[in-house]
Amino acid sequence: AWGLSDRVKNIAPSPTLSIDAKTKQMIAEGIDVINLSVGEPDFGTPEVACTAGKLAIDEQFTKYTAVPGILELRKKIADFLQGHSGLTYTADDILVSSGAKHSLYNAFMALCNPGDEVILPAPYWVSYPEMITLAEATPVVIHTDETTGFKITPAQLEAAITPKTKVLLLNSPSNPTGAVYTREELQALAEVILKHDFYVISDEIYDQLVYDVEQVSIATFGDEMKARTLLINGFSKAYSMTGWRVGYMAADRSLIKAMTSFQSHTTANPASISQRAAVAALDHRDEQMVSEFRWRRDYVLERLRHMPHLTCDTPSGAFYVFPNCSATYGKSYQGKAINKSDDFAALLLEHAKIALVPGSGFGAPNNFRISYATSRDNLAKAMDRLEAFLRLVQ
Ligand code: PLP
């Protein structure tokens, strides 16, 4: 028979990527749009990583590698996790993939049977619900808002659990809210998980981008918790290597073995050149990038504080702020009605020439996401435009 599979037909296009595409089109037409919708650092890939990548090409390190990644890289990742989080893994507990997105997809495909439930705290990163559905599992969304700092409570988690619960998805620091769970909060969630005995996929891709708080992995709460955790991380954010496509999972060896088989038949090893670059990147922690992001976060928050109609929590990590714009709903801008975050973002793009992502795609209809992964000059201009726009909302 003719036509696409239901699986593919049911995928929603990524709202972050579509805003980005529209913005790029406007820029190509010569329109001066400031893009605050991007999910990648505006810094360059570290020189050491670029050099290692070039050397890999010159040395003809350009063939298939071991499916789970070269031993040198997996060993380095294990060392990093020991130093960074105090977690003991060996190279056999690591599976390197073509980006953390790929690692997440492997995780859902390996854990979920049709009908299994994945508990998904909202606001969530846009790809999670789609990946869960592709794995034929069902997302069970827990809604959170500013009252709990966009974090789920143990009581909310308990209430979402059913006999079909297979996995909890945790993303701390969070995209889109920047929220970071504290040690105590994670400990309390770990107790619920152990009591009911299910897995956690812990997406820690923003783990090095935290400001004045500690980053804790849920895998650190004892061996039983570690055995139930699939820790996901990668090189895109902390090392500005989005285009190199390297991510990884650290988990119980039996899970890694199964997922390595799965990966061997779908994509095989991540790019050999990128793996060499990733080895070099692990020696390079860019403190300057972290302090620059902290400065920008503080700047944006300070500007937002003086704008009408908006409220904004202080995010502790990643490079996003997630203001609440629901006070504009029912109002209008120059006669054009604002009734939801999509209206707000569309009007901003058209009239203020600022690209932002509406919260609807993140399961958060009252908010919008600002990425501050852009220059100080751009942020200053964007905040001026946003303020001028809001002053005309009535
Ligand atoms: N997880 C989260 C929360 C992200 O925000 C992103 C990128 O936007 C990813 C995973 C995917 O990163 P990668 O480039 O390693 O696939």
Image: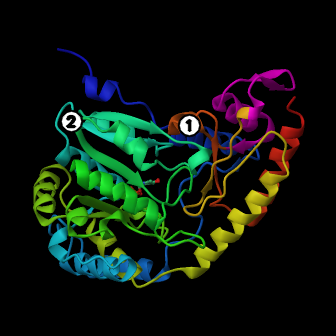
What is the total number of numbered labels drawn onto the structure image? 2
Q: Is residue 170 above or below residue 74?
A: above
Q: CA distance from mark 1 to mark 2?
A: 27 Å
For the question of whether residue 23 can be seen, the reply is yes
Q: Given this view, does label 1 or label 2 mark the residue nearer the observer?
A: 2
State whether residue 266 is above or below residue 87.
Answer: above
Q: Is residue 386 left or right of residue 357?
A: right
Q: Quadrant of the N terminus?
A: top left
- Residue at image x 14%, y 72%? 92
Q: Is residue 78 left or right of residue 370?
A: left
Q: Residue sitting at 41 percent across and 36 percent down?
A: 141
The colour scheme used here is rainbow
Toward the viewer: 374 or 215? 215
Give percent across and percent down for residue 275: 30, 72
Q: Secondary structure at mark 1?
A: loop
Quick check: is 180 in the magenta stretch?
no
- Mark toward the start of the polypeptide (1 vs 2): 2
- From the viewer's perspective, tell me whether residue 381 is left or right of residue 175: right
Whether label 1 lies within 8 Å of ligand 1 gets the answer: no
At label 1, which amino acid type do we have?
Ala
Above or below — where is 345 with respect to 383? above
Q: Secondary structure at mark 2?
A: loop
Q: Is residue 66 toward the left or the right of residue 80 in the image?
A: left
Is residue 54 visible to us here? no
Task: Provide residue 79's location: percent of width, then percent of height.
Answer: 29, 82
Magenta stretch holds residue 335: yes
What residue is shown at x 69% (from left), y 32% (from top)?
Answer: 346
Q: Amino acid at mark 2?
A: Pro
> Which residue is labeled 1 in the image?
364
Alpha-carbon neighbours of circle 1 within 10 Å: few (<14), some, or many (≥20)? many
Task: Give coordinates of residue 173: x percent, y percent.
Answer: 49, 60
